Image: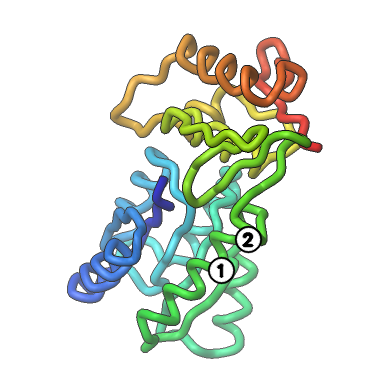
Amino acid sequence: MRAKIFLLEDDIALNETICDFLNENGFETASAIDAEKAQNIIYEQKFDLLILDVNVPKLNGFELLKKLRKNSNKTPAIFITSLNGVDDLEEGYRSGCDDYLKKPFALKELLLRAETLLKREFLHINEKVKITKQCSFDINSQLLYCNDEVINLHSKEAKLLTLFLKNSNSIITHEMIESALWDFNEMSNTDSVRTYIKNLRKFLGKETIVSFKKLGYQLKQE
């Protein structure tokens, strides 16, 4: 499963250049040239990383990220901007960003910063994340390893397991699951979620994923 990155950049040529570069390096991208459209897309879809220009039409990047954070959107964010004063840097971090990259910048540097944030977000140093004594999950390949057996999960089962690992030992609500597994143009399916949970329990152990009536589920990671 490729990491999904959203880009807000009002310079159309630069927008296309960055998206093409990220796509060539294994990411899936979506973009907008103004903050109002960006806000709608970010609310409708699930992203792993946001890259936001600051001086854009209709709403600046700082204000956009503040609104997202107030609505509990914790997606890692990088500001890319020509603003280079200390006050601008301070405002950027206070608005909730994770990194701040001054223009002009090399695309390679943006890629390295994006990869670093994504690794931190997935909470792993090595590719495999240990779940139980018998099972571990490779975030990059989306493969589950149990007792030396390699298990190729359904794409939405892999997304669900990734969500659990990013929120280990916390209750994942039904709304969070729907947002992570289905894009805005897809119809969510409660029965399918139950099936994905059942299949994951089959590999990880029934006691590993705990149900909370009307709330959601919790992964008990060792």
Q: What colouring style does the render use?
A: rainbow
Question: Disc 1 marks which amino acid?
Answer: Thr
Q: Nearer the viewer, residue 46 or 200?
A: 200
| Disc 1 element | helix
- Kindly identify the residue that appears in the image at 47 percent across and 30 percent down: 153
Q: Quadrant of residue 184?
A: top left
Q: What residue is pinned by disc 2?
A: 120
Residue type (three-letter) at the residue carrying disc 2: Arg
**Label 1: which residue?**
116
* Percent x, y of residue 132: 75, 35
SS label for mark 2:
helix
Query: Residue 141 appears at what percent x and percent y?
Result: 47, 48
The reply to whether callout 1 and callout 2 are in contact (CB within 8 Å) is: yes
Point out the image quarter for the N terminus: top left
135 with respect to 198 (left or right): right
Task: Say whether residue 89 is left or right of residue 221.
Answer: left
- Residue 22 disc label: none
